[in-house]
Image (cartoon, rainbow, N blue to C red):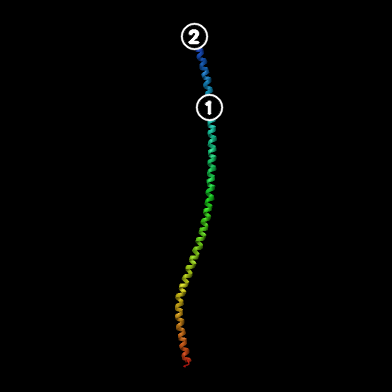
Amino acid sequence: MDAELREYLDGKFRQVDEKFIVLEQRIDDKLKALEQRFDDKLTALAKRFDDKLTALAQHLLHEMDTRFSLVDKKLESMDSRLKLQAGLIQTGSRAIARLSDYSENSEARWVDLTIRFDSLERRVDKLDPPAQH
């Protein structure tokens, strides 16, 4: 009976082992399927994240380009106005310099003209003395 019991128990253990093997295989298959689903979801999320990040980067680049274009236009406008003001300042300083030269020369010319006029007046007086009253 001992041998029969042993054979019976060995049979039962084998059945349990076979069931465990089948269960283990099913669990492994389910784990692999779950792992594959997890990997697929993770890959899809990573792709969505990359797409969103790319879209954000493109949006930021577009916004920066737009803003820098506005800044460039404003800087160009400021540059044009500064060049105009510089031209006016330079023109004004040249005019002031010419006026200064003219005023310095005009005084000398006035003195020269007065001397010449007095000389001419004396010569005319010598030729034709003024009538005395």
Q: Amino acid at mark 2?
A: Leu
Secondary structure of the residue carrying tag 1 is helix
- Could you tell me residue 89's position as x and y percent? 48, 65
* Residue 38 in the image: above or below residue 113: above
- Could you tell me residue 61's position as x and y percent? 53, 47
In the picture as drawn, the residue positioned furthest to the front comes out as 133
Q: Amino acid at mark 1?
A: Lys
Picture residue at 52% right of the left edge, 51% below the top: 68
Dot 1 or dot 2: first in sequence order is: 2
- Could you tell me residue 8's position as x and y percent? 51, 10
- Could you tell me residue 28's position as x and y percent? 52, 24
- Mark 1 nearby-residue class (10 Å; few <14, some 14–19, many ≥20): few
Picture residue at 48% right of the left edge, 70% below the top: 95
Q: Which mark is residue 131?
A: none
- Mark 2 nearby-residue class (10 Å; few <14, some 14–19, many ≥20): few
Cα separation between marks 1 and 2: 39 Å
**Residue at numbered disc 1:** 32
Secondary structure of the residue carrying tag 2 is helix
**Residue at numbered disc 2:** 5
